[in-house]
Image: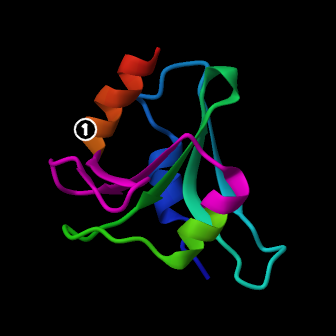
Amino acid sequence: MRKPTAFASLGRLRFRPEPFSASFYNGAHTRDAGSNDLVLTLPGGQLWAIEIKRSSAPTFEKGFHFACADLKPKERFVVYPGHERFSLDSVTEAIGLRKLAQVLQAVR
């Protein structure tokens, strides 16, 4: 069972400008259930899928791919404790929390 700490810690994002909304996704309706630690809905209904990792060498689990296949988010991020922003694959970026805050502020 996934611990709610990642969602709880980022669900109250102080840098999250309004009218963004934050939620959690759990695709338990499938055999290979996928989930995202955080799903941001931006103005206009645009979705961003966010996975939170403690490791300084971020990776994502196959559940993240399953959830993204269901949600079809515009952006996919794996937040990690580092400072660099880099690609993990062709559609997913690793990003530090401060850098993610800057990206969100620019979206306004």
At 55% from the left edge and 67% from the top edge, which residue is drawn?
64
Extreme residue in the front direction: 90
The percent coordinates of residue 6 (x first, y second) are: 47, 60
> Would you place residue 1 above or below residue 99 in this image?
below
Residue type indicated by callout 1: Arg
Extreme residue in the top direction: 108
- Front residue of this view, candidates 35 and 6: 35
At 17% from the left edge and 55% from the top edge, which residue is drawn?
82
- Work out which quarter of the rendered image holds the N terminus and state it: bottom right
- Front residue of this view, candidates 20 and 13: 20
> Would you place residue 102 above or below residue 4 in this image?
above
At 28% from the left edge and 49% from the top edge, which residue is drawn?
95
Rendered image quadrant of residue 80: bottom left
- Front residue of this view, candidates 1 and 40: 40
Which residue does the numbered mark 1 point to in the structure image? 98
Q: Is 80 one of the magenta-colored residues? A: yes
Which residues lie in the magenta part? 68-96
Task: Report the number of numbered marks.
Answer: 1
Q: Secondary structure at mark 1?
A: helix
The percent coordinates of residue 78 (x first, y second) are: 38, 57
Left or right: 13 with respect to 94?
A: right
> Would you place residue 22 above or below residue 102 in this image?
below
